[in-house]
Image: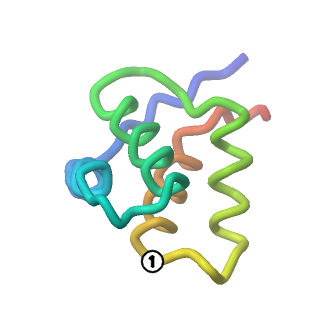
């Protein structure tokens, strides 16, 4: 199985940290933020469940731009064979 070695950028990591501290942020946004931060300086990959969540967020019109940015970052760090 191939590994995706991409890591979360510093801009997305900052957005993720701000999202986690925001009391108004949705649970989905916070989950995506946590996933993005967990991949900041490691070789971790996005799990299948988070891939599904992120793809649903990107396909929906109801999420904020910031949430979609987190979703896109999480998806770029997914296993390419899935």
Few, some or many C-alpha atoms within 10 Å of disc 1 (few <14, some 14-19, many ≥20)? few
Asked whether, in this view, residue 51 is left or right of residue 40, the answer is: right
Work out which residue is located at the far front of the displayed protein and give it: 23
What residue is at 49 percent from the left and 44 percent from the top? 31
SS for callout 1: helix
Query: At 37% from the left edge and 37% from the top edge, which residue is drawn?
Result: 7
Instruction: From the top left corner, tell me how far across and down residue 81 is, in percent.
Output: 77, 32
Q: Nearer the viewer, residue 59 or 43?
A: 59
Quarter of the image with the C terminus in it: top right
Instruction: Name the residue at the top extreme.
Output: 1
| Viewer-proximal residue among 72 and 34 | 34
User: Residue at 64% of width from left, 64% of height from top?
Assistant: 57
- Single out the residue that lies furthest toward the bottom: 61
Q: Position of residue 15 (x, y in %)?
A: 27, 58
Of residues 62 and 35, the one drawn nearer to the viewer in this rendering: 62
Q: Is residue 15 left or right of residue 29?
A: left
Residue that mark 1 sits on: 65
| Residue 51, percent from left and from top | 67, 44
Q: Is the image coloured rainbow, by chain, by secondary structure, or in one colour?
A: rainbow
Relative placement, left or right, of 79 versus 76 is right
The residue at the point 59 percent across, 23 percent down is 3
Instruction: Decide: is 78 above or below 17.
Output: above
Quadrant of residue 66 in the image? bottom left
Question: Which residue appears farthest toward the right when viewing the image?
Answer: 82
């Amino acid at each position: 199985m191939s590994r995706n070695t991409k890591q979360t950028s510093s801009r997305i990591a900052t957005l993720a940290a701000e999202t986690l501290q925001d009391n108004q942020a949705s649970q989905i946004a916070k989950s995506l933020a946590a996933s993005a931060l967990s991949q900041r300086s490691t070789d971790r990959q996005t799990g299948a469940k988070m891939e599904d969540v992120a793809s649903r967020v990107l396909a929906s019109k109801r999420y904020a731009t910031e949430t979609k940015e987190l979703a896109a970052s999480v998806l770029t760090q997914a296993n390419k064979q899935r």
